[in-house]
Every structure is written in C-alpha cells, then in structure tokens.
Amino acid sequence: MPRFNQKAIWVVGVLSLLVLSAGVEATAVGKVWTFDGDTPDSLPKEFVVGTLFDGRPAGDWKVLRTDQAKSPPHVLGQVEEKGAEHAYKVVLVNGTEGSDAELEVSFLPVDGRADMGGGLIWRASDDRNYYLTRANPLEQNIRIYRVVKGIRHLLQKFDQTISVKRWHTLRVITSGCQVRVLYDERQVFDLCDNTFTRGRVGLWTKSDAVTYFDDLKVRVLK
C-alpha cells in the first residue's frame, strides 16, 4: 500500500477515535450533591426555590447539619412545618436541563400531619410544569404525576408500606416517553407519557411535610 494512503488511513482512524471520545463525554453529564461541603442554613448555588400561588417562597429549603444525615454531616431539608393542602414546596436545580436522564435521591420523612414524605421532579420547564414521583408514608403509597400549570394529574399509583423516620430512595430513569421509577431499588412504575420532553430536575414536598434529602444524583443524557 502506498505510504500516502497508509498515513491518510491512520489520520482518519485517529480522528474517528477523537470524535467517538468527544461524543461519549458530550452525551452524559453527571453530578452528585451530598450537601456536606455547603454552609448550614444556606442553599446550594444551583438550587432555586419556586413560588406558591400567593407569591411566597415554596418552602423553607436549606442545608442542615444533623446526626440523621444518610451521608454525614449535612442534608438538604424542607423545614417549613405548615402549608395548605395544595402548597407544593418545590426547589429546582439549574444546570440539569435535558431530555433523557437518570436521577436518584434519598429522603427521610421527618414530620407532617396533613402530608409527609417527598419526591423527585424531572423535565421541569418551571415550578408549575414538570413530572413528579413522590412517596407518602401517611397514605402508604407511591404516585407519579404530570403537573401542568400547577395542577397535578395522576398517571399511576402503587401501594407500598413506607416506614417513617428512616431513609428511602427514589430513582427515575427516562428515555424518550418511557419513564421507570424505582423505590428502594424495586421498580414500581414503567410507563410512557409525552407531555414534557425536556427540563430541569428538582425536589418536592407538600403542605406541612418536613423532609430531609441527601445524596442527590443526576446524570443527564443530552
């Protein structure tokens, strides 16, 4: 084979490897928030608290130092102990926008009489439009919703014994219209919905639920 052709093939091969490597790096963005490096009583800089319908902040979200942390010493807590029935306490995370994603969070139900527990948000265009899966120890179930203009629309529910004052995990995997949800590593939902195609990730509680969150993991597939 002529020398020129050999060199040309070598260059093409190297360029192909570089393109492939660049593609792998460009298709997945992952981050983990343990909150352990954040200052107590503050909010991590990427996190943005939503607003309630009356304009007030959607909850009192802040980093807490506690011996109840799953990965000590800090958690992110929603600690406002009051709220109307449909007061959705929402915090969204900037820099997590995408379509397909894998996300996971651990949550600890701490208190609540009208409501308890918490959930994961994905494909949020804002604090009124998003997908949500949440686990409620008072109702002993897990549900998945689409929230449109601040109104929840139930997609599916799953009855499940949920112990209070112990850590649980929610994991969501999305690909196109397909959504899979795992609770404590057990799959509870596998469905298709096309309402939202991309958006940010977030965390959620409702009404008077006091909840701690730890080890939020987000891997966005662009």
Image: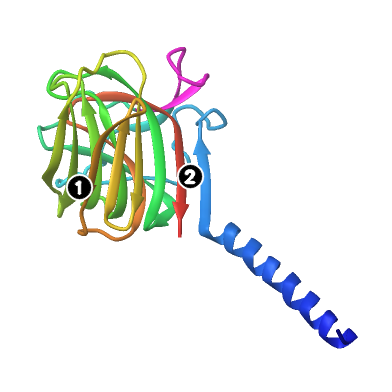
Q: Amino acid at mark 1?
A: Gly
Q: Amino acid at mark 2?
A: Lys
- Which stretch appears magenta? 64-77
Q: Nearer the viewer, residue 91 or 187?
A: 187
Picture layout, residue 23 above or below residue 107: below
CA distance separating discs 2 and 1: 21 Å
Picture layout, residue 89 above or below residue 198: above
Instruction: Say which quarter of the image contains residue 168.
Output: top left
Spot occupied by residue 170 in the image (x, y as percentages of width and height): 33, 32
Name which residue lies at 80% across and 75% down: 10
Spot occupied by residue 75 in the image (x, y as percentages of width and height): 44, 25
- The residue at the far right in this view is 3
- Name the residue carrying label 2: 45
Mark number, residue 198: none
Q: Do labels 2 and 1 touch, CB within 8 Å?
A: no
Q: Is residue 79 left or right of residue 219?
A: left
Task: Name the element at disc 1.
Answer: loop
Q: Is residue 119 left or right of residue 21?
A: left
Instruction: Say which quarter of the image contains residue 104.
Output: top left
Task: Name the element at disc 2.
Answer: loop
Spot occupied by residue 23 in the image (x, y as percentages of width and height): 58, 64
- Name the residue carrying label 1: 55
Q: Is residue 144 magenta?
A: no
Spot occupied by residue 35 in the image (x, y as percentages of width and height): 50, 31
Q: Nearer the viewer, residue 9 or 166?
A: 9
Q: Nearer the viewer, mark 2 or mark 1?
A: 2
Name which residue lies at 52% across and 59% down: 27
Instruction: Say which quarter of the image contains residue 112.
Output: top left
Name which residue lies at 90% across and 84% down: 3
Who comes first in sequence, dot 2 or dot 1?
Answer: 2
